[in-house]
């Protein structure tokens, strides 16, 4: 049985989604700008609520990194507000005619981009996700049904109240941005089972959340998976380029999913590349196979290292004898996120692109480019490592569906 | 724990999918044609196996309609074989560059259509689904992992053996078409939970199967849902056209999901349309509201009738006062499949297209056109009533994914 409060809220969100679905681009953008203004107008209340969350998190001895993600300040609030204005500037995906034709019998057929309806988001303790997700959902014509973590509930409630005020001021239903009030584990599971209300559920969290989704969710969902990303340096790579790309992929932001976790190096260039790399990023701990350790200082890699997404300044390193061996290693250990090759060989690049199975395959560039902003999506709600609906960075387009419009003149079969 | 036999078979199918993924269009088409030939070569064995299934189904007192779906004969086998040849003639969806651009920093970005990988299909007792599904999966570069019903297992085994012989003869791995041997309920659930093997699971069956999928599946799936389809005849419709469309939508093939189940009629035209309709399709049982029953003979409709997909020569009928009331009725009761309006008014047609939320909205044509063949997809694996990945008829394109290809010249962030 669904909690009656959650069920009633779901009905309200669904009703709001039906208004949003037909809202003009102008009205949606007005709502986004009004919400951006309201976030600033209510900054005192939001920061006060956030301070209470942070104090409670300290008392509960949450990890420093978690408290850092939870904390808001004037700058972060301004960034959240600006984020909403930026989304208002993007093109409206709704109404795009994706394709169309006239059938031999004269029936006119189009596929037209439409909102999904109600987008559910389950997320952990970053209050900025509240406004980021709400903004993208609104722009794509969806109602945002948000379920944050207990530790951020005061902050999320204050942020949501401000956004709702903006949405209402623009003449759209405030329930188009709704936050689940009860943050208990039970309601998270019930939330995943709101069939007929939630059209798409997006989890933004760790492995435990994804596992709970697979186990319990009955509504359609898209998974934002792990990034165990590889860089393979081929026999005839430009080694200067290789060094720059590896350093960038590993160190520019090690805590994100598109950072590299394993380096594969062709035996022919290992002796030239590895010492230079060791020198170029002394802060990175290497966990390596024997061939690598014969060339540079590194601790031994265990089988587990090949599967680990460190999200830290740690890199697994392995020397391979061939492109085939590199492709086989990736096929075995990749999480299907982003896989890069550095090579001067057209043949090697072509094989990598054809044979490696990942959301993004990258030739002579850093894995760090696999990001909605870098790829021109404007903003992203996550990066999908599954193959249904969305693969790779998910932007506004991935928050829409397509439907068929048929126009006849009395056509019958 | 997954059954070790199923897990081992899953590993074999996954390995085969990696070969299929990179197979040329020529080799896939050769496999399809060879499989088509093998179906005919082995017709005696297939028909013998099917006769045993049919005899067992009779002994088990299966319904006549189920036995009819189960039975094969020379004609049906030829149609299955021809179906594989027809799929070979379709354009290969794999490799299509969906879109692409050069980023301001010179990074070249493309989205390219690729196979899903392993497509699982769970289906009921129609042996033709074995070859239809296998053919579409192969053409789109996927391995087909099939789980049929116990009652059709002898037939499915014989059909699969023939197709595998054809695939092998074309130099592709036979495991690209694999049938689960154990048809117990437990393996169906285990099949839905083959994470890391099945990239997309497609159920072809009734509500019980869909409910089991929602409850148990942990792999990504697309649901082929109900079709509670409406036809609304507006105040200024051409009534001749309306009559033809309603008769076609209801009676041309009442047992399929795109048949109409409820007729909504504007009050202004009810007295002219309904008696003519009653006369035009005397074989159809009407279940109607009071206003309708004042005009034609019909039994009273209960609340349940508005939600029922009859799949039979039964039509629910309701008189409405306005387009608004028709749209509200559809919003409440529609299963989101196909919704048609008959109208001469541009304004009414525009509102219907904008406001009705369904996989297909239809103006002045029969709902029966919402079909992969009619819409130019060549063939369909089902009709999705959910909004993720695929909506409406699913053809070869919906059996693919898209991935990102990034090409740089040493690009770093």
Image (cartoon, coloured by chain):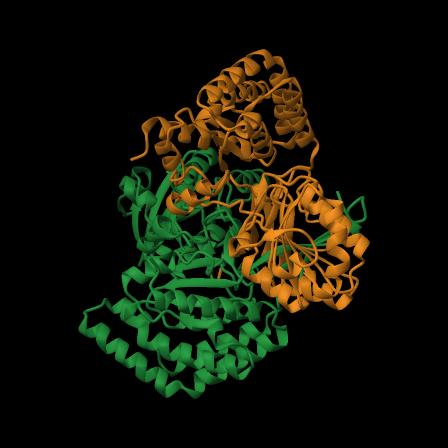
Chain colours: A orange, B green
Above or below for A137 versus B111 = above
What's the residue at 53%, 29% (across, down)? A66
Residue found at the very far top of the displayed protein: A44
Q: How many marks?
A: 0
Residue B266 occupies quadrant: top left
Give the image location of residue A187, x and y in percent. 37, 32
- Can see residue A357? yes
Q: Is residue B354 left or right of residue A214?
A: right
Q: Is residue A85 above or below residue B403?
A: above
Q: Answer above or below: position of A259 versus B175.
A: above
Residue at 39% x, 45% y is: A218
Q: Image check: B49 left or right of A145?
A: left
- In this view of the protein, which residue sits in the foreground, B124 or A72? A72
Front-lying residue, A128 or B263: A128
Q: Indicate left or right for B147 with B340 as reference.
A: left
Q: Which percent across, then down, holds residue B328?
A: 43, 35
Quadrant where the image shows the N terminus of chain A: top left
Q: Nearer the viewer, residue A378 or B58?
A: A378
Residue B159 at what x, y percent from top left? 40, 78
Q: Is residue A386 visible?
A: no
Q: Position of residue B305 (x, y in %)?
A: 30, 45
Q: Residue drawn at (46%, 79%), measured in percent from left and top? A: B164
């Amino acid at each position: 049985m669904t909690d009656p409060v959650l069920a009633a809220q779901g009905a309200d969100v669904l009703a709001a989604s039906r208004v949003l679905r037909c809202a003009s681009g102008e009205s949606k953008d007005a709502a986004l700008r009004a919400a951006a203004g309201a976030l600033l107008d209510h900054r005192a209340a939001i920061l006060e609520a956030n301070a209470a969350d942070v104090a409670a998190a300290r008392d509960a001895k949450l990890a420093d990194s978690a408290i850092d993600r939870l904390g808001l300040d004037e700058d972060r609030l301004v960034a959240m507000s600006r984020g909403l204005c930026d989304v208002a500037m993007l093109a409206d995906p709704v109404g795009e005619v994706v394709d169309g034709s006239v059938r031999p019998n004269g029936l006119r057929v189009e596929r037209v981009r439409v909102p999904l309806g109600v987008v559910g988001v389950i997320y952990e303790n970053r209050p900025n996700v509240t406004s980021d997700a709400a903004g993208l959902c609104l722009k794509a014509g969806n109602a945002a049904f948000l379920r944050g973590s207990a530790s951020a509930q005061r902050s999320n409630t204050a942020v949501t109240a401000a956004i709702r005020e903006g949405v209402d001021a623009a003449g759209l239903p405030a329930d188009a941005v709704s936050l689940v009030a009860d943050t208990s584990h039970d309601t998270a599971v019930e939330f995943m089972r709101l069939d007929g209300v939630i059209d798409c559920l997006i989890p933004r969290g760790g492995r435990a959340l994804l596992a709970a989704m697979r186990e319990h969710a009955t509504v359609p969902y898209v998974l934002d998976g792990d990034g165990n990303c590889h860089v393979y340096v081929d026999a005839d790579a430009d080694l200067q380029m290789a060094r720059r790309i590896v350093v960038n992929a590993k160190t520019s932001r090690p805590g994100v999913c598109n950072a590299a976790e394993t380096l594969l190096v062709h035996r022919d260039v290992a002796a030239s590349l590895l010492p230079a790399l060791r020198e170029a990023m002394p802060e990175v701990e290497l966990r390596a196979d024997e061939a690598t350790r014969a060339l540079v200082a590194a601790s031994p890699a265990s089988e587990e290292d090949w599967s680990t997404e460190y999200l830290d300044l740690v890199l697994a390193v392995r020397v391979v004898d061939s492109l085939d061996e590199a492709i086989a290693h990736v096929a075995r250990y990749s999480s299907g996120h982003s896989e890069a090759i550095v090579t001067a060989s057209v043949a090697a690049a072509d094989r990598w692109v054809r044979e490696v199975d990942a959301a993004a395959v990258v030739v002579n560039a850093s894995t760090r480019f696999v990001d909605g902003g870098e790829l021109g999506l404007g903003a992203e709600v996550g990066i999908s490592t599954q193959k249904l609906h969305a693969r790779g960075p998910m932007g506004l387009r991935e928050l829409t569906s397509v439907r068929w419009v048929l126009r006849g003149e009395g056509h019958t079969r």
